[in-house]
Amino acid sequence: MNRTIALPAIAARVAELAGVDADTASRFILGLFGAAEQEIAAGRQAEIPGIGTFSRSDGATVLFTPADELADAVNAPFALFSAVSIPADAPANIFSADDEYRPQEPAEEHAEEVSPPEFTMTPPTAPDEPVPVVEPDAEPQSKEPFEAEKQPMHTDEAPEPQYIYVERRNHWPWIVAILCLLAGFAAGFCYGKHSSGPYFSNPDRKPVPLDTAVAADDSVNVYIQTLPIDTDTVTPDTLTATPTPDEPEAEEPVYDTVGTTRFLTTIARDHYGRKDYWVFIYDANSANLPHPNRIHPGTRVLVPSLGPHAATDSATRAHARQLAAEFYRRYNL
Amino acid sequence: MNTKQALDHAATVAGCDAATAGRIAHALARVMRERCGDLDSVAIPGFGTFVARKHDERVDTDASGRRTLVPPHIDITFNAGSRLRKQL
């Protein structure tokens, strides 16, 4: 609406309707209006079928009379209207007049508009309570003149329903989210409490056959490497060997406990004076310990004596570096 | 120049036969009806522009004071192009 259609768009549409190409349609349109142009310039009347008639007026203007089929098609939406005589007693401005001169709407549509909606709230009344009857004479006496002027002109119309906006608050999503969060915390706590966890278990530990197992002291968290026992040759008498008086007394093993702030390096520094010697502690307990960085706090470890490694400080450090390199390769540290 | 002569001239310019020219002329009239019915303007280069304008309902008063309510309608006017005005 209110656009200017250029020749290419017209030619494309004409070509679509006539079944020709757009170039042919464009040349035909230009040729048709070119012929009309020559006729108008010559002072003659030119008629284009379906569009209208062109003629030249006295001056340098062109008079255009649209064809009847074009005028009728354009005014088709107003074909039902016709000129109407206005009565003499009608107001001066009939377009802003009252209901008398307005077009009457169908009764059903008018009833739908003025009827109150279904959700209009009405004050509850008791079934036995009689409907109050308003005395026509009593009500105007109690009202002030100023309030009376506020009354609408047309009292037969249905009163405007008054809507009260009540904000809808729905807290259920938040409550459900909080409950799910608490349930997740509880499940995580129970799982962590009843399982050792993947980081504190020793994946290299394998079950030991009963005939080769030796009961270890439960109070000491040290894994004792055992050897197979030949039950045919070994008797209980042979197991009760008494130490010979010539053998020197074995040194009492030293144990220490890994804590949250006490690592193998800390223990090595306390016992050996160098934290780099933690590898000897780990080597002595490697069968019972997992990843060096994942030792569970509270684990008791055997602190071996340096023994042959303590020959010289340089040899000990070299051996410690060698062991550290081996551990690094093992765990890809 | 009557209608047939105008169509023959346009068919000669476009290089098509009379039947095709008739179809194109009917299609052009239909396009004009569609565009003007939508209150659009149709511009022909060099010739002019067809402008569709809607007039609302109004009250006409004749010399005797009698008033008449005139319904709305659409008028189609023609504004000559520059080339056509030069030839006049």
Image (cartoon, helix red, strand yellow):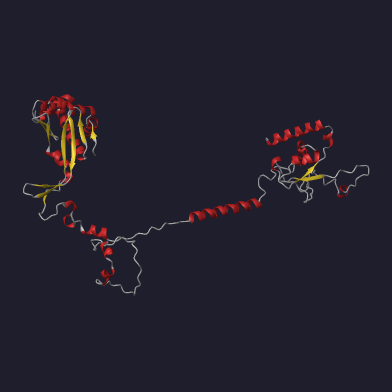
Q: Residue at x 77, y 34 (%)?
A: A320
In this orientation, which residue lies closer to the viewer: B69 or A71? B69
Residue shown at 49% from the left, 54% from the top: A173
The outermost residue toward the right is A245
From the image, which quarter does the N terminus of chain A lie in?
Answer: top left
Quarter occupied by residue A112: bottom left
**For residue A273, above or below residue A241:** above
Is residue A21 shown above or below A1?
above
Q: Quadrant of residue A273?
A: top right
Q: Position of A118 compared to A88: left or right? A: right
Can the viewer see residue A223? Answer: no
Residue A150 placed where, x, y %? 27, 61
Whether A110 is drawn above or below B2: the answer is below
Whether residue B18 can be seen here: yes
Q: Residue furthest left?
A: B64
Residue ID at (19%, 40%): B37
The residue under the point 75% across, 34% down is A323
Foreground residue among A287 and B43: B43
Q: Nearer the viewer, residue A272 or A183?
A: A272
Can you give x and y, in whole percent of width and height, for residue A67 in the image? 12, 37
Q: Which residue occupies the extreme front position in the image?
A: A145
For the C terminus of chain A, give its image quadrant: top right
Residue A234 at what x, y percent from top left? 85, 46
Quarter of image, res B20: top left
Q: Is residue A10 above or below residue A182?
A: above
As drawn, is B59 to the left or to the right of A232? left
Total number of numbered discs in the rendering: 0
| Residue A141 in picture, x, y percent from top left | 26, 70
